[in-house]
Image: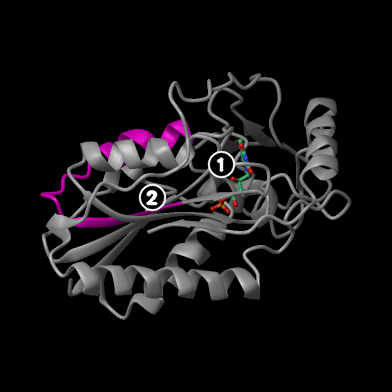
Amino acid sequence: METLSLVYFSPTGTTQKIVREIGQEMGLKLISENNITQNQDKFKPEVNGNCLTIIGIPVYGGRLPITVIEALKKIQSNQSPVVIVVVYGNRDYDDALLELKEIAINCGFRIIAGAAFIGEHSFSSNDKPIAENRPDKQDLIKCRDFARMINKKTNDIRDVNTAIELNVTGKYPYKERKQLPVTIHPKTDNDLCNRCGTCVDICPTNAITIKETEITNGELCTWCCACVKNCPNEARIFDNPTINAFKEKLFLNCSIRKEPMYFV
Ligand SMILES: Cc1cc2nc3c(=O)[nH]c(=O)nc-3n(C[C@H](O)[C@H](O)[C@H](O)COP(=O)(O)O)c2cc1C
């Protein structure tokens, strides 16, 4: 392997951080970085035999976000090596890594390694922190450890075509995806909003428009919280009894620190 390609979806930035850290430590020449959080229609995957691809996707409801699957399926590889990474908010990653493995195999990749890392939960807030500020220094050290394990494995086996199929955790049938109620989504505090348009630009599903006031299309919103975490005026607020009860549950049940898992 001589070159590296990164593919990731990362509305609140934790997956991006982790994938970049792993990639940097690999010591390969970076030839493409595909952030598919927005503009998935423009995603033109390029994969060749000598290139290692790292794919990083966050976990939503124990699965991959439904809005990323079609973009991933566009990738066509001819048995080139891939590292699959899921990032979750300290609850669980359930079947997400297995789902990513299956998609990668169907794209024609040969899976060299997989991992589940932890990132600050998209619903984390100052009053109910969940995996706050992760990935932190310790996580980033583990990203580099993981990269060195991958390098060692690829050096040891020399010919990646001889790599045996990788087992990862997860089970069939996959955890069922829950339908999100369309009336629940982040809202704008119009006293704080100065119509800068950041939320419109960063929303992965183009669910937000600004006219006189901001309008969120609940049918498109995936609750990713990109708008909440990136609003420069903290005007986007996800404050609703259902969400608050969910945050409380996460805060109470998921506060014990989990550590990254590697499959190499
Ligand atoms: C709709 C939604 C569902 C989520 N479901 C899970 C989950 O099942 N388990 C978990 O531990 N974290 C879950 N998370 C948290 C994210 O996986 C986590 O915050 C991740 O770091 C976000 O990645 P990003 O920063 O790249 O967007 C969920 C987040 C969202 C927005």
Judge the density around disc 1: few (<14), some (14-19), many (≥20) Cα neighbours within 10 Å.
many
Q: Is residue 190 visible?
A: no
- Type of the residue with mark 2: Ile
The residue tagged 1 is 93
Determine if the C-beta at disc 1 is less than 8 A from ligand 1: yes
Residue 157 drawn at (x, y percent): 19, 67
Q: Position of residue 167 (x, y in %)?
A: 37, 44
Q: Measure how far apart labels 1 and 2 are at the Cα level.
A: 20 Å
Q: Identify which residue, 224 or 38, lies in the foreground.
A: 224
Q: Residue at x 78, y 40 (%)?
A: 250
The residue positioned farthest toward the right in the image shown:
127
* Percent of width and height locating residue 31: 23, 70
The percent coordinates of residue 65 (x first, y second) are 48, 36
Cβ of mark 2 under 8 Å from ligand 1: the answer is no
Number of marks in picture:
2
User: Would residue 218 appear left or right of 154 to someone viewing this image?
Assistant: right
Q: Name the quadrant of the N terminus.
A: bottom left
Seen in the image, is 194 located left or right of residue 78? right
The answer to whether residue 70 is magenta is yes
- As displayed, is residue 220 above or below residue 58? above
Task: Report which quarter residue 236 is drawn in.
Answer: top right
Q: Provide the residue span drawn in magenta.
A: 64-85
Q: Give the side of residue 67 with respect to residue 182, left or right.
A: left
Q: Residue at (21%, 72%) from the top-left corner?
A: 3
Which circle, 1 or 2, is nearer the viewer? 1
> Any mark on residue 36, and which?
2
Q: In what quadrant does ligand 1 lie?
A: top right
In this rendering, is residue 196 above or below 245?
below
Residue type of the residue flagged with mark 1: Tyr
Please report whichever mark, 1 or 2, sits nearer to the chain's N-terminal start: 2
Which quarter shows the C terminus?
bottom left
Residues 25 and 199: in front is: 25
